[in-house]
């Protein structure tokens, strides 16, 4: 009987058929297929049938947390993911450095700016709000997070991000009639204006303009959420847990759920294929010291958003090659699933159910021979929801209590 759980989430890997096949079905994936052949398979609605999940709500559900109860917005998870020690009651946001010219957003990602340390430092030093602590921290590339800490705040406000170029920054407005929401909207508008004043003529942006590059002179603020109290995963399940991921969102979800984030050094200089193998090896190494490991693998999702069928196929084949060691695991329940479908024809998330497999001691092996969206429905798991995953997994490692006499 297994005593450990390795949960692998292939971010956005599921798709819809293009000329009769999906990238996952078209890809040559002998290792994934071997795990499916030796395990039990099914389809999963991460949230519920017909509901398009985000990566945030879907990961919460798969970890056993009802997103309708614990999800307040993406901001808190992004903030935790970049290393801000968020506290209950904080109002947190995700942000982009962007380019503002003549009052118009001309590049929502400021030319995918990378070096933003000095810009973030200037924001923290110069942006002030009476009675409220303003905490800003850069993430990877153009991304960043913002936290407002103080009394009388609310997450019931709108974004400032116009969502496309050629428009001015939106003014933040309250979405309810509370004085807290009105005050928070005013604070966000003040922060937005102060940031422009603080960094527009910074040395970094002066130099970027000389080089013909878009300046990162404003931030676009979105995804407001009040930091929730989430019962720690180790206490709920009695498992020492870890997360291996690169995306700040997933790292933040892991941290807020009580999973230890295990970093992988040197990833920036690696090729994408090498990164996958290094992350898989890190997760396998973590199983020596942890009972539960969440491994998130991103890449297929990006290809889906870009409409890249062949690119998605190639990425999934690279993932499969890195999965060869999974076939030799002992004492471990391996779960491989997807957080949401990202069809290349849609270039966005969809509500299509995703494939899930469970392979390990005690599993009732079904007759499915391939890991694809088009064959998973034939498996013994049938069709489940994301919130079912941990219940099933805990039962398979004999770590559940009987309901009833």
Image (tube, helix red, strand yellow):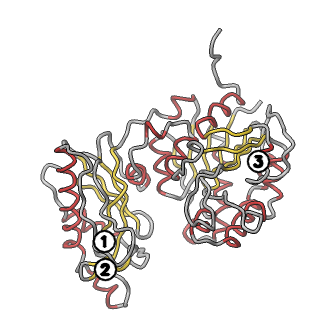
Q: Quadrant of the N terminus?
A: top right
257 relative to 310, above or below:
above
Residue 376 bears which disc, if any?
A: 3
Q: Earlier in the sequence, mark 2 or mark 3?
A: 2
Question: Percent from the top left, x then y, of residue 224?
Answer: 33, 52
Asked if the residue under mark 3 is in contact with the one under mark 2, i.e. CB atoms within 8 Å, the reply is no
| Residue 316 sits in quarter | bottom right
Asked if the residue under mark 1 is in contact with the one under mark 3, i.e. CB atoms within 8 Å, the reply is no
Asked if the residue under mark 1 is in contact with the one under mark 2, i.e. CB atoms within 8 Å, the reply is yes
| Residue 173 sits in quarter | bottom left
In the structure shown, which secondary structural element does the residue marked by tag 2 occupy? Answer: helix
Question: Percent from the top left, x then y, of residue 211?
Answer: 37, 90
Left or right relative to 186: residue 85 = right
Mark 3 to mark 1 CA distance (whole Å): 49 Å
Q: Which residue is mark 2?
A: 204
Disc 3 versus disc 1: nearer the observer? 3
132 relative to 203, above or below:
above
Which residue corresponds to the image point at 34% horizontal and 85% vertical from the top-left? 208
How many discs appear?
Answer: 3
Which residue corresponds to the image point at 29% horizontal and 41% vertical from the top-left? 89
Q: Which residue is mark 1?
A: 118
Left or right relative to 93: residue 199 = left
User: In the depicted view, which residue is nearer to us: 352 or 340?
Assistant: 352
């Amino acid at each position: 009987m297994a005593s450990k759980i390795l949960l692998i989430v292939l971010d956005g890997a599921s798709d819809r058929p293009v000329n009769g096949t999906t990238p996952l079905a078209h890809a040559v994936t002998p290792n994934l297929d071997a795990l499916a052949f030796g395990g039990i398979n099914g389809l999963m609605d991460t949230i519920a049938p017909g509901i398009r999940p985000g990566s945030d709500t879907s990961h919460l559900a798969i970890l056993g947390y009802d997103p309708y109860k614990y999800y307040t917005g993406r901001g808190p998870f992004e903030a935790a993911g970049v290393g801000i020690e968020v506290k209950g009651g904080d109002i947190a946001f995700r942000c982009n450095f962007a380019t503002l010219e003549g009052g118009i957003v001309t590049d929502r990602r400021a030319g995918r700016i990378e070096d933003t340390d000095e810009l973030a430092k200037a924001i923290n030093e110069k942006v002030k709000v009476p009675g409220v602590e303003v905490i800003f921290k850069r993430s990877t590339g153009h991304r960043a997070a913002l936290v407002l800490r103080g009394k009388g705040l609310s997450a019931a406000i709108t974004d400032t991000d116009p969502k496309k170029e050629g428009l001015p920054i939106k003014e933040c407005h309250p979405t309810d009639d509370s004085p807290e929401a009105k005050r928070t909207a005013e604070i966000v508008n003040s922060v937005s204006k102060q940031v422009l004043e603080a960094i527009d003529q910074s040395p970094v942006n002066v130099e970027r303009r000389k080089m013909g590059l878009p300046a990162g002179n404003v931030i676009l603020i979105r995804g407001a959420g009040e930091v929730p109290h989430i019962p720690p995963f180790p206490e709920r399940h009695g498992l020492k847990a870890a997360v291996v991921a690169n995306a700040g969102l997933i790292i933040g979800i892991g941290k807020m759920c009580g999973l230890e984030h295990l970093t992988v050094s040197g990833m920036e200089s690696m090729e994408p294929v090498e990164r996958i193998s290094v992350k898989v090896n890190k997760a396998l190494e973590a199983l020596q010291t942890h009972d539960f490991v969440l491994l998130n693998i991103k890449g297929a999702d990006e290809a889906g958003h870009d409409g890249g069928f062949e690119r998605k196929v190639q990425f999934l084949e690279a993932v499969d090659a890195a999965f060869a060691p999974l076939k030799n695991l002992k004492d471990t329940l391996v779960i491989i699933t997807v957080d949401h479908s990202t069809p290349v024809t849609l270039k966005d998330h969809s509500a299509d159910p995703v494939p899930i497999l469970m392979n390990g001691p005690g599993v009732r092996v079904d007759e499915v021979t391939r890991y694809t969206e088009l064959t998973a429905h034939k498996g013994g798991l049938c069709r489940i929801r994301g919130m079912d995953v941990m219940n099933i997994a805990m039962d398979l490692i004999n770590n559940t209590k009987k309901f009833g006499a």
